Image (cartoon, rainbow, N blue to C red):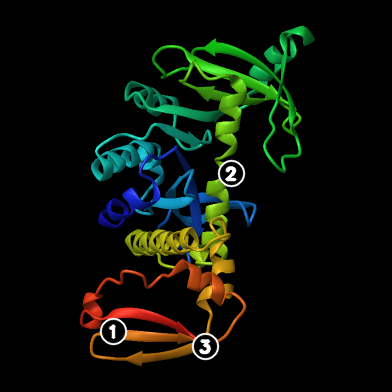
């Protein structure tokens, strides 16, 4: 919590919203006393540790992780994140984006009572799809989702207010076709003022957490955790959040690389040979010649150096060949 509290003024002084998602980490040992969850890469359910992550939309920075979860308490994890953010910043998140598996409708109602806006997906049950197909073509309105590099931009939608079992009061439902799926996609939100197009664009940003989890799996080797003890995995998941934050901070300082992935930053800037000289008051790091050194010079990462306690309060200075 303290790590995120220090980073909050730097990365997200005015957070735009948060994308939330679960990620099961498979257990590859002998049979374990772990819950079984669906593992997308294996295409089947298996013993795994369920982790939960939150990503701030604008900075693309992971800011929360929890692996000490069981199937019985996973639906309450969203509200635990809300309470965590209240303790860190003193205020609740403004917008949350998640899919239908994150919470049930009772938790959605709690979220609505907390005056937090959300956009989520409703499961496409056969009866709902049949009812939507019964609407005449004239009932479907047109819109354009002009997100760069998006394949499907021309959509049609029907907007209505519906009642959900366990959810107190009406909720807004936007059924959308033209997103590349055979059946309509059902968006749910408790925000009645924004246009359907704006809600869809908001939810499209949730793909960033899938990208962030993909980076955590491929670069930080999140799925290589093998402990049968959830608390051990919880520590490693927290370290993944810290590692992701460090790379996002570095990216924010490098001109032209603000949206670079950690793997790209590592290959071009971190994986660099050099010489370290220890002096009484500082460490001097002389980096070998490489094509990206001018970007590091421009960033001036050693400007206004802070003494590092675990280096006997020495500062760090960069020089270049």
User: What crowding class fits label 3: few (fewer than 14 Cα within 10 Å), some (14-19), or many (20 or more)?
Assistant: few
Front-most of 112 and 5?
5
Badge 1 vs badge 3, beta-carbon distance below 8 Å: no
Q: Work out whether residue 161 can be spotted.
A: yes
Please state which of residues 137 and 294 is positioned toward the viewer in this rendering: 294
Tell me if residue 131 comes above or below residue 41 in the rendering.
above
Q: Local crowd at mark 2 within 10 Å, few (<14), some, or many (≥20)?
A: some
Judged left or right of residue 282, residue 14 is right
Q: Can residue 127 be seen in this view?
A: no
Q: Which residue is drawn at 28% across and 51% down?
A: 5
Q: Which of marks 3 and 2 is in front?
A: 3
- Element under label 1? strand
Q: Nearer the viewer, mark 2 or mark 1?
A: 1
Residue 112: give its label: none
Query: What residue did someone put label 2 on?
Result: 207
**Do callouts 3 and 2 mark residues in contact (Cβ within 8 Å)?**
no
Mark 1–mark 3 Cα distance, whole angstroms, equals: 19 Å
Quadrant assignment, res 245? bottom left
Q: Residue 321 carries which label?
A: 3
Q: In this view, does 160 lie above or below 5?
A: above
Q: Residue 60: x, y in percent?
A: 49, 50
Within-10-Å neighbours for mark 1: few <14, some 14–19, many 20+: some
Where residue 235 appears, as percent x and y from the top left, is 34, 63
The structure residue drawn at horizontal position 36% and vertical position 35%, both measured from the top left corner, is 93
Q: At numbered mark 3, what does the secondary structure look like: helix, strand or loop?
A: loop
Residue 316 position within the rendered picture, expressed as x and y whole percent measured from the top left: 33, 79
Viewer-side label of 1, 3: 3
- Which residue in the structure is indicated by mark 1? 282
| Label 2 element class | helix
Residue sitting at 53 percent across and 36 percent down? 99
Mark 3 to mark 2 CA distance (whole Å): 41 Å
């Amino acid at each position: 919590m303290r790590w995120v509290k220090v980073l909050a003024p730097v990365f997200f002084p005015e957070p735009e919203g948060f994308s939330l998602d679960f990620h099961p980490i498979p257990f590859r040992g002998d049979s374990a006393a772990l819950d079984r969850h669906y593992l997308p890469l294996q295409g089947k359910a298996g013993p795994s540790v369920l982790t939960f992550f939150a990503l701030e939309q604008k900075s693309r920075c992971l800011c929360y992780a929890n692996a000490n979860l069981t199937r019985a308490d996973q639906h309450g994890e969203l509200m635990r994140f809300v309470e965590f953010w209240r303790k860190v910043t003193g205020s609740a998140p403004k917008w949350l984006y998640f899919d239908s598996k994150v919470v049930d409708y009772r938790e959605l109602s709690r979220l609505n009572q907390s005056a937090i806006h959300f956009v989520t997906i409703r499961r496409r049950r056969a009866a709902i799809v049949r009812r939507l197909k019964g609407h005449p073509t004239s009932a479907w309105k047109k819109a354009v989702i002009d997100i760069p590099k998006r394949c499907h931009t021309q959509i049609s939608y029907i907007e209505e207010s519906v009642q959900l079992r366990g959810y107190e009061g009406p909720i807004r439902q936007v059924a959308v076709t033209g997103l590349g799926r055979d059946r309509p996609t059902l968006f749910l939100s408790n925000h009645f003022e924004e246009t359907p197009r704006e809600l869809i664009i908001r939810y499209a940003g949730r793909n960033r957490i899938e990208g962030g989890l993909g980076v955590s799996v491929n670069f930080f080797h999140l799925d290589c955790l093998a402990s049968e003890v959830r608390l051990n995995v919880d520590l490693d998941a927290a370290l993944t959040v810290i590692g992701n934050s460090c790379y996002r901070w570095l990216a924010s300082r490098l001109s032209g690389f603000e949206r670079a992935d950690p793997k790209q930053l590592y290959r071009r800037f971190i994986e660099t040979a050099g010489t370290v000289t220890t002096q009484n008051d500082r460490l001097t790091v002389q980096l070998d010649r490489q094509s990206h050194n001018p970007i590091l010079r421009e960033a001036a990462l050693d400007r206004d150096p802070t003494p590092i306690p675990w280096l006997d309060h020495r500062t760090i200075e960069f020089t270049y060949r």
